[in-house]
Structures are given as C-alpha cells and as structure tokens.
Amino acid sequence: MEIKVLIDEIEELVTPEGKGPLSKEDQGRVKIINNAAILIDENGTIVDFGKRERILSNYRITPSTYVLSAKGKTAIPGLVDPHTHLVYTGCRHWELKERLQGKGYIEILKRGGGILSTVEETRKSDEDELFALASKRLDIMLSYGTTSVEIKSGYGLSLKHERKILNVINRLKKERGQIISSTFLGAHAVPPEYRESPADYIDLIINSMLPEFKGLADFADVFLEEGAFSYSEAERILKRARELGYGIKIHADEITDSKGACLAASLSAQSADHLLYASDDCLKQMKQAGTIAVLLPSTAYFLKKTFANARKMIDMGIPVAIATDHNPGTSPLYSQLLNMSFAVFFMNMQPEEALIAATLNAACAMGKGEITGSIEKGKRADIVLLNAHSYMHIFYETGHNIVDTVILGGKVVLKKD
C-alpha cells in the first residue's frame, strides 16, 4: 500500500467517531489528539491517524509521499451541509426589507413572492446557466470548509423544469469533488398555473414526476406547512415516494406545529428538517423511529424567529444535525462555520455537539455516514485544516473564516497560505 499524503505536525486533531448518527451524551464526545498525523492512500482513503510518533514509526514514508505540514493548525472532518437549495437564479433581497418591516413569510408567499418568484426566474434559465451558478456557490461553500452538500430541486415545479434542476444536480455530482446527494422537492409550493386546481398538481407529482425522476434523486421531500402542502397531501406524496424507493425527508413544523415530525416518524424518514414548533409527542416518535433532526439556525436568524430547541432534542436522544438551508430568500448563508456558532449561541448547543451536528450527524442525514463525516480509518479523506491551534476558535472567532486548507478525497483543493 502506497502512502500518497502525510498530513504532519497537526497541533490538534478533533473528530467524532462512528458511521451512524450520534445522540444524547455521545453527541458531545469527540476524540482530540495533539501533535497528530494523518496518512492517506492513493485512493483518497484514510489509512491511519493518531499521535505523530506512532504514525511515523509504524509506516514507511517515501520520497513520493506528499507531506503537508499542519504545524500550528487544527484538523477537523470536512463540514457537511445536509439541507440546501443551491440550484436557482434570481435574487430576493427585497424580501429582507419587507420582513424587517414586519411582513410574514406566508404573507410574502401569498403575494407571489418567496418560492414562486424564484421559480419564475429559474424557469427562464437553461441547465448550463444553473450549473455555472451552482458551481460558484459550491466553491464559496468549499472556501468555508464544506466538503459534502445535499441539494434539493423545488424551483421548477413542473415536469420539465424539475427534471432540468435534477439534471444539474446530477452533473454537479459527477463534475465536482464534493460529495453531493440529490433531493426531489417538487412539493415545494403549488405553481401559479395550478393555483385553482392544486389537487391536479399533486396528481402530477405522484403519477408523473416521482416515477420519472427515480434514479435522478436520492430523496423525496415535501414542504408541509400552511400555505404549502397539508399533512394528508404530504403523506400521500411521501408514501408514493417510499414505494418507489426514494429516501424520505420532510420540511416539518417550521412556521406552525403541522405534525410534520409525527409524519416523518411514521414514514421512518431519514430526517425531519426545521422543527421550530414540533411537539414533544412528535419528537418522541422521531426518537423511536431513528429520524435525524436537521436544524436550520440560520433560517431562524434571517426570519427573526424563535430557534429550534436543540437542547431538548439532544437530551431526548434525537440525533441533531445542522444545515445552512442556503436559498435566495430566507437563508442566503454559505458558511457552516458561522452556522455552528449560531447553534452554540442561539440553540444552547455545546461546541462539540455543534461540530458533530455539522459533520458526522449531517453526513448521516445525507445517507453518507459510512464514507464521510469523521476522520477515521477507511473513510474518505475529506479534511479541513483550520488556521488556529484549537477547534474552539470556530466559536471564539465567530464570523471569521479560519479555514486554511481543504482536502477532498485525499486531494488538496484549497490552500490559503
């Protein structure tokens, strides 16, 4: 076995351990190794990691091995963003001003703003334009240390345009170094042409979109909320998706207690996302079902809403992940680093819990926990070096991008100094 890369002299290495989501006390447990090293093979897989003395004495480093000095730096797993809407055109900066003046999300949506205004712009764009814009967004995320991303459709809302967006996501999967999972979100809103007959649009999703997009999307999702889709509509769509072999995700309990967490549990969903107003009973059902809670602190921040109760969920034993929810209207955030600080300062999470929420648990929410989300033997070498002597500087220097180097599948793709 050839050692292709040695990351040497790491001042602090911090990682969760495992392939499944961590909950309760385990969500606060990370391995910390000082004066560490990591070995990566020619396939971009982690061969070993640990104390530098042991690594250097147990393995043969040849002249062909690329040695990357991490002196004075901290190594963490590549960050994972398990809920984004990256494929779109257009801008909705004007909505921010309206929200600051007191207008609510549903009010803006009913006036043709919100999701529908992005749908109008995105429908005008071809695949090449959408691919170029999404690639630039992924580059920005990479600069903040994000190495894996879930991307949803949902700004097409027709057979033609939803396929177009899913084609773009799949092209990103093939051409980008980041790990990407795809989610079909045709049930994001009812498009204008079906405003008078929403049942017909739901039939289109169930009878045409879901069967035709099988293989293009890993997951199916529904925005279950007042002004979007009801509990019974969401249940019907997601049951059909499950029959067809999609993984299940749900936008749940963001604006009201819509019982989305209960529906997620009943369908054994991979994740239920948002959960600002989820009831204790539904959360208990999620715990029993093993559904991951994907919380979106940046969305609550931009919407000036109460934050999801991460502390309660962790104490109940629900695995918690965090995501940026990057979208052009309610959370135009790229940085999981800043999002982790939001989780600590606004959702009462401990730093270790936030790190796990943005790495291993987030990877599990994408269905990728077996291959990424931690620095461990046999996992893909997705690693971020921070220009700091401790991972605590993520929170101590909130708002400052301390990413120095990003390694994707064993390759250095970003190095700042």
Image (cartoon, helix red, strand yellow):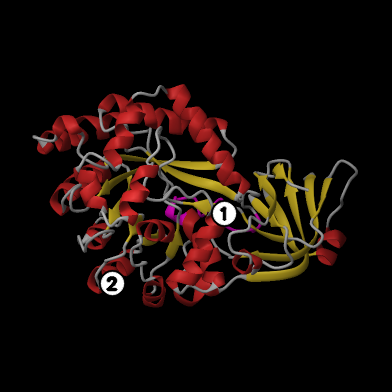
Residue identifier under label 2:
284
Give the magenta part as a residue range: 364-377
User: Which image quarter: residue 33?
Assistant: bottom right
Q: Secondary structure at mark 1?
A: strand
Given residues 100 and 346, the one toward you in this image is: 100
Given residues 50 and 137, the one toward you in this image is: 137
- Residue type of the residue flagged with mark 1: Leu
Quadrant for the N terminus, please. top right
**Picture layout, residue 112 above or below residue 18:** above
Residue at (49, 54) in percent of width and height: 363
- Residue type of the residue flagged with mark 2: Lys
Locate residue 286, reporting x and y percent: 30, 65
Q: Earlier in the sequence, mark 1 or mark 2?
A: 1
Residue at (85, 59) in percent of width and height: 56
In the picture, the disc for residue 79 is 1
- Magenta region includes residue 77: no
Crowd band around label 1 with a 10 angstrom C-alpha radius: few (<14), some (14–19), many (20+): many
Locate residue 136, reporting x and y percent: 55, 35
- Magenta region includes residue 374: yes
Q: Secondary structure at mark 2?
A: helix
Q: How many marks?
A: 2
Locate residue 300, reporting x and y percent: 37, 60
Residues under numbered marks 1 and 2 in contact, where contact means CB atoms less than 8 Å apart: no
**Residue 296 horizontal side relative to residue 276, left or right:** right
Gap between marks 1 and 2 measured at Cα: 28 Å
Front label number (1 vs 2): 1
In the picture, the disc for residue 318 is none
Given residues 19 and 124, the one toward you in this image is: 124
**Picture layout, residue 251 above or below residue 184:** below
Given residues 37 and 143, the one toward you in this image is: 143
